[in-house]
Amino acid sequence: MGKWQEMTKEELETQYSPSKWSPRLVTDVIEAHIQATSDATRHTQAATQTLLNVPYGLREGEKLDVYLPKEPSQTFPLVLYIHGGYWQLLSKDVSGFAAWPLVTHGVAMAAVDYDLAPKGRLDEMVRQVRRSVAFAAQQYTGSSGLYVLGHSAGAHLAAMVLSTDWTEFGVVPNIKGAFLVSGIYDLEPIMHTYVNNVLHISWEVAQLNSPLQCAPKLEGRQGCPVLIAVAQHDSPEFRRQSWEYFEVLRKAGWSVSFLDIADTDHFDVVEKLSQEDYLLTQVILHMISRI
């Protein structure tokens, strides 16, 4: 029995409430996060060449916002950013904040939308994000490679991209790296918290869509370097899940690294990607430049 099974419901809900672990409790951390990412996204859209609301599928929620380098090379890298929000909040409209340092270094970024709960089901969200990656591979054939960058629930979805059987999509994307920030890799504990009041995921859905459970299927796909990052002030459960997923990938032979970022909480660990001199920004740019 793992430690989370020994927790009371109240303890478990505290562990999976990221705002309760932030030292910035003097403010509404979630509201501040939305404000910061919204402001930075507006700035980026005003300062870069963008293609907004690009459909990657037929459903209303299946759209991308693409941020292009000012002087793109013939073979620019493309990062797909997958937002968090516990699969029920946020959108691509507040997810362009990370694009500015990327586009200034010749890297394109696409912010991915997907249908949120309760309208969207979790297994369909996984399919939608996979579909967005397949679309990007087919649409941007001149790209030097695709990278997935996800935060929180978005890191879960990005990790599920790594276990995709691409035969049904008719394309095998050239995924050259994955950056997973403060993610969730085991959905079973989530089933026993307030988060599932909206998600309504069953045990079967949790097993099929947990990256930790999918990891045994990842043998032979180790060509994609993976960075797993956590915030200093992520909860112990978020940190445990990240470390366990790191260990599983490492034992499966993947090129995987673990980054523990000081003086950050669950929210500003990704907000600061709008800053070129931020540690995680620099690590991502370095990984892209050498792959």
Image (cartoon, rainbow, N blue to C red):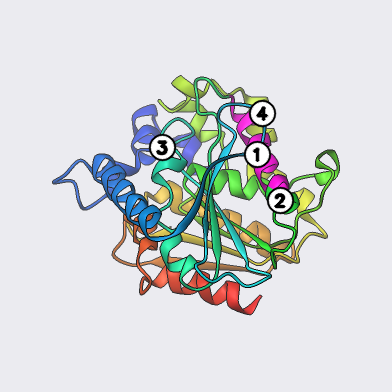
- Between disc 2 and disc 3, the foreground one is 2
The C terminus - image quarter: bottom right
CA separation in Å, label 3 and label 1: 19 Å
**Magenta-drawn stretch, dominant element (helix, strand or loop):** helix
Q: Quadrant of residue 73?
A: bottom right
Query: Where does label 4 land, which residue?
Result: 58
Task: Measure the C-alpha gap from mark 2 to mark 4.
Answer: 15 Å
What's the CA distance linking mark 4 and mark 1? 7 Å
Tell me which residue sits at (40%, 25%) in the image: 194
Asked if residue 140 can be seen in this view, the reply is yes
Q: Earlier in the sequence, mark 2 or mark 4?
A: 4
Marks 3 and 4, how far apart in space?
20 Å
* Image coordinates for residue 65, horizontal then vertical, percent: 51, 46
Q: Is residue 131 magenta?
A: yes
User: Dot 1, how many residues are within 10 Å of its Cα: few (below 14), some (14-19), or many (20+)?
Assistant: many
150 sits left or right of 34 in the view: right
In reply to whether residue 151 is colored magenta, the answer given is: no
Quarter of the image with the N terminus is: top right
Helix, strand or loop for disc 2: helix
Decide which of tag 3 and tag 4 comes sooner along the chain. Answer: 4
Tell me which amino acid carries mark 4: Leu
Q: Secondary structure at mark 1?
A: loop
Q: What residue sits 43% from the left and 58% below the top?
A: 98
Q: Residue 148: horizontal and vertical position, in percent?
A: 60, 55
| Amino acid on which the number 2 mark rests in the picture | Gln
Q: Residue tagged by mark 2?
A: 139
Write down the residue under mark 1: 56
Question: Which residues are drawn in magenta?
Answer: 121-135
Circle number at residue 90? 3
The residues bearing labels 2 and 3 have C-alpha atoms spaced at a distance of 25 Å
